[in-house]
Image (tube, rainbow, N blue to C red):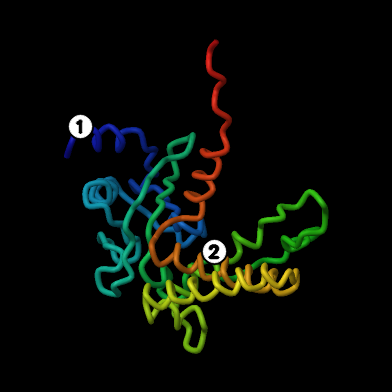
Amino acid sequence: MTMETATIASRIKWDAQGLVPAIVQDSQSKEVLMMAYMNEESLLKTMESGSTWFWSRSRGELWNKGATSGHTQKVTSMSYDCDGDTLLVQVNQVGPACHTGTYSCFTHPIAVQGSDGGSETTETANRFEILNTLERTIAQRDAERPEGAYTTYLFEKGVDKILKKIGEEAGEVIIAAKNASHEELRYEASDLIFHLLVLLREQKLPLDDIMAELTRRHVPKAPKEA
């Protein structure tokens, strides 16, 4: 055990059973995938190995996520909350996170009185929310690979097929613009953005990184001194 891992472990507020809940989140789509428990040993093994380890309360033993299923989780970052009694583990998920075969364990919505279900009903709603929705859906398709889904087809064919589609759609965007057709351009640009999001998922590059790069470029440069 290194000094750093020992220090982190000492800052966690373990419960009476020596456990702490760990929320696992997809580092790309930001979807919450699952919740499990860690003890000090599994936390240290996670930190040292870079893959998630948990403590099974039912079996009374450590378990490494994906060791038998192949649905592994490569840790990209870890943090603990302000009280030190909950962990947040961001991962690159391979395959479904849930033992039922779904991308996320949280698949049963609960109706809340007064909720609009997340629909955009006001002008102040996030007009780019569809990008978040698409990113989550594409991540789900990547994990679950439902038969007959177009996105499954793209992932199974691999990066060359995805790149070919991006090239085709980029050409269609150019033609639509030359035709000065807003309807055609809207349709083709949508296809291009969709396939670009598929490529980002295949390459394990979060959309957040693209937004951060655009933000960085937009920062005005300080004026030069006279």
Residue 100 visible in the displayed image: no
Is 182 or 211 nearer to us in this picture? 182
Task: Determine which of the numbered discs, if any, sits on residue 64 in the image.
Answer: none
Residue density around tag 1, few if under 14, some if 14–19, many if 20 or more, within 10 Å: few
Image position of 32 with respect to 172: above or below: above
Residue 124 visible in the displayed image: yes
Which residue position is annotated with label 1? Answer: 3
- Describe the element under mark 2 as helix, strand or loop: helix
Q: Position of residue 49 (x, y in %)?
A: 22, 52
For this view, does 116 lie left or right of residue 51?
right
For this view, does 132 lie left or right of residue 103?
right
Q: Position of residue 62 (x, y in %)?
A: 25, 59
N-terminal of the pair, mark 2 or mark 1, is: 1
Which residue position is annotated with label 2? Answer: 135
Cα separation between marks 2 and 1: 38 Å
Q: Position of residue 196 (x, y in %)?
A: 51, 65
